Amino acid sequence: MLKIESYTVEKLEDPFGILSGDRYEFFLELDVPEDDELYSENGVMLRVIFMKDEEKEQISKYEFIENDTKNVLDFELEEDEETAVLTFCREHYNEEEEDSAIENLDN
């Protein structure tokens, strides 16, 4: 289970107008159990680039980041977790720059 404690979202600007659609950067603060291999005493967040255009909505890129050190962690989302994160982004992309209430995502 991915448990999102809080998140921020910001619309990314394309200064040259090269990219189609809109892109949003999410930072999802995760609550990771101590027995999970992703666990870090420093805390873990998931950075997600969400893309939305007229034809589709998708995750363009994501990475797990250790909160205190900002080191990128070499982990991948499982298919069901990626689906849950995509759903979360679809539901929250228009709430850019707001801190939000706790959300839970089940596997």
Image (cartoon, rainbow, N blue to C red):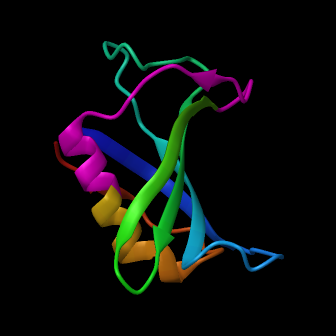
Point out residue 83 in the picture as x, y percentages from the top left corner: 24, 53
Is residue 19 highlighted in magenta? Answer: no
Q: Which of 53 and 66 lies nearest the eye of the viewer?
A: 53
Q: Which of 32 and 91 lies nearest the eye of the viewer?
A: 91
Q: Quadrant of the C terminus?
A: top left
- The span shown in magenta is 67-85
Point out residue 93 in the picture as x, y percentages from the top left corner: 48, 75
Q: Kindly identify the residue that appears in the image at 43 percent across and 74 percent down.
A: 92
Is residue 81 highlighted in magenta? Answer: yes
Q: Kindly identify the residue that appears in the image at 53 percent across and 80 percent down.
A: 95
Image position of 73 with respect to 48: above or below? above
- Please give the count of numbered marks on the rendered protein: 0
* Residue 3 in which image quadrant: top left
Q: Quadrant of the N terminus?
A: top left
Image position of 77 with respect to 103: above or below? above
Drawn side of residue 76 relative to residue 19, left or right: left
Q: Which of 39 and 101 lies nearest the eye of the viewer?
A: 39
Drawn side of residue 88 relative to residue 74, left or right: left
Point out residue 84 in the picture as x, y percentages from the top left corner: 25, 54
